[in-house]
Amino acid sequence: MPMTPDVIGALISIIGAAAIIFGGQFALMNRLESRLTTHMNLRFDHVDKRFDQVDKRFEQVDKRFEQVDKQFEQVNQQFAQVHQEFVQVHQQLDAVKADIVTLKVSVARLEGPPPRLISVR
């Protein structure tokens, strides 16, 4: 097929139309990519802010756990002190019981033997 000026003009028109279409698509794709990038950056910023909030909340919870741990240690120390005092009081009660038994024995010795009943026959 010979290359006539009409064929060459048609080819140039087709190539120009294709260039316009592909150029438009390229421009649209660039705009879409730009919008998607902006949208994703905004989403990532939002997610980052949320993670920062969650991190701060975890720090607060960690501090609260540390406070509770300290209080628990204090309560355990107080419990140990109370337990020690209870043991001491129990030992003192045992000593008092032993003193009462000793006192009863001493009183019985001081009173002497029980009087004998004289039987009348």
Image (cartoon, rainbow, N blue to C red):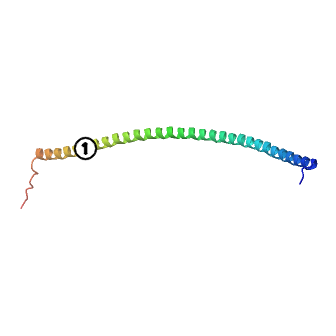
Disc 1 designates what residue? 91
Residue at 44% from the left image edge and 40% from the top image edge: 69
* x and y, in percent, of residue 83 in the image: 33, 43
Question: Which one is in front, 63 or 44?
Answer: 44
Q: Quadrant for residue 54, please give it.
A: top right
Q: Decide if residue 97 is on the left or right side of residue 22.
A: left
Farthest right residue? 6
Farthest front residue? 2
- Amino acid type at mark 1: Gln
Question: Which one is in front, 50 or 44?
Answer: 44
- Name the element at disc 1: helix
Q: Is residue 9 above or below residue 49?
A: below
* x and y, in percent, of residue 118 in the image: 7, 56
* x and y, in percent, of residue 45 in the image: 66, 39
Quadrant (top left, top right, bottom left, bottom right) of the C terminus: bottom left
Residue at 56% from the left image edge and 39% from the top image edge: 55
Question: Which one is in front, 33 or 86?
Answer: 33
Farthest left residue? 121
Q: Decide if residue 48 is on the left or right side of residue 108.
A: right
Q: Quadrant for residue 56, please give it.
A: top right
Question: Which one is in front, 46 or 41?
Answer: 41
Quadrant (top left, top right, bottom left, bottom right) of the N terminus: bottom right
Q: Decide if residue 104 is on the left or right side of residue 120.
A: right
Q: Is residue 23 above or below residue 117?
A: above
* x and y, in percent, of residue 81 in the image: 34, 39
Q: Is residue 69 above or below residue 118?
A: above
Farthest bottom residue? 121
